Image (cartoon, helix red, strand yellow):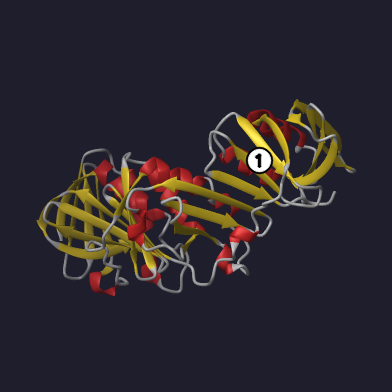
Amino acid sequence: MKIRINRDTLIKGLNWVQSVVEKRSTMPVLSHALFKAYKGELEVAATNLQMVIEGHLEAEVDVEGGISLNARRVHDIIRALPPGEIVIDTDERNRAEIKGEKGTFHLMGLEESEYPPLPEYKETPLVEIKAEVLKAMVEKTIFAASMEETRYNLEGVLIQFEEKGKSLRMVATDGHRLCLVDKEVENAEKLQLAKGLILPRKGLSELRRILAEGDRVENVGFGVIGNDVVFKAGNVALIMRTLEGEYPNYDRVIPKGNDKVITMKRIDLLEAINRVSIISEEKTKGIKLSVSTGKLRVESQNPEVGDAFEEIAADTEIKKMEIGYNAKYLIDALGAMEGEGLNLLLKDELSSGLFKTEEDEKYICVVMPMRL
């Protein structure tokens, strides 16, 4: 293999794969990235056996071929070289010569055939989703996925086709809170996601990073390959293995009889919680919302530190009610919402609260109360 490629272009490709490459593994090859040269392009890919990132970069290819090289070392070498043309030339001993304007490096690699086989996705039918829509759906749900490894099926986000609304739905819950978002996506029914698939939290974090960095793309292709799903954004593809197990019946968690409504400005409540929770206990992050006619009082007490409270304007017919919440859960939910006006729907002090805004009506967050 022999290629000539712009240094900044190559760095872009190496940046894509860094977070997938295993830093410590019983399989040394997983610390490598795979480089494959075709006519006019260089393919850079990496896998941790649960997730694959594959990028295609424009390059001048003198000799086609492939090799796997230690991803971190190649990244460090290319970053150290000045802008300009980079030449990568490999020989039959799997030794790569990396040459820039002010330096030449020789790096031992492995044969292309020793790299784990990567899923084929190029023939998979893809449904186009607006990149900003997909990114928003991930950001509105991923924080609610469980961090506990013992709750394997809750470590991801459920994605399914919502037939009644002809839309794509994402749901996440950790057993203490639940977030659900629906977005209209053309041809979503073609994905055959009536039962849904559970996408891993780490994979979605990577997808969010790809959509937030680098070249902006208008649409993302989404398809299903057996137990894997693929997202293709411009010149980069992300393939992730779905989680096994059955997702819980989330519809039973969504309150149906919360008839007590508190209306307020979302940013007012978010800022009040941010300030008052500074005093809350580090472990529980507990705060109390005290509701009375015309106002909502946000307060926290910490025997070892002190106490704090703040009052904001609120429109409600509730005469008096007190309910405790984990401040972080509310901050996450309110921060992910859009719109100015917030509705908090309650039943009583012991039942879950339902948070939603009129401007973002296809997005709801359910948060369980906590005893203080």
Q: Quadrant of residue 272?
A: top right
234 or 134, which lies in front?
134
Residue 46, percent across and down?
Answer: 34, 61
Residue 367, percent across and down?
Answer: 69, 49
Q: Is residue 233 above or below residue 194?
A: above
Residue 311, percent across and down?
Answer: 79, 27
Q: Residues within 10 Å of mark 1 (few under 14, many from 20)?
A: some
270 or 258, which lies in front?
258
22 or 85, which lies in front?
22
- Residue 1 shows in this picture: yes
Left or right of 7 in this view: 343: right
Left or right of 323 in this view: 164: left
Quadrant that contains the N terminus: bottom left
Q: Is residue 344 above or below residue 227?
A: above
Q: Is residue 311 above or below residue 345?
A: above
Q: Which residue is mark 1?
A: 331
Q: Residue at x 22, y 68 (%)?
A: 94
Q: Residue at x 35, y 71 (%)?
A: 226
Q: Residue furthest right?
A: 303
Left or right of 263 in this view: 18: left
Instruction: Please name the amino acid that badge 1 sits on.
Output: Ile
Find numbered disc 1 in the image and state the secondary structure of the residue it sits on: helix
Residue 171, percent across and down?
Answer: 54, 55
Left or right of 15 in this view: 92: left
Q: Residue at x 21, y 42 (%)?
A: 101
- Residue 70 shows in this picture: no
Image label count:
1
Q: Residue furthest left?
A: 62
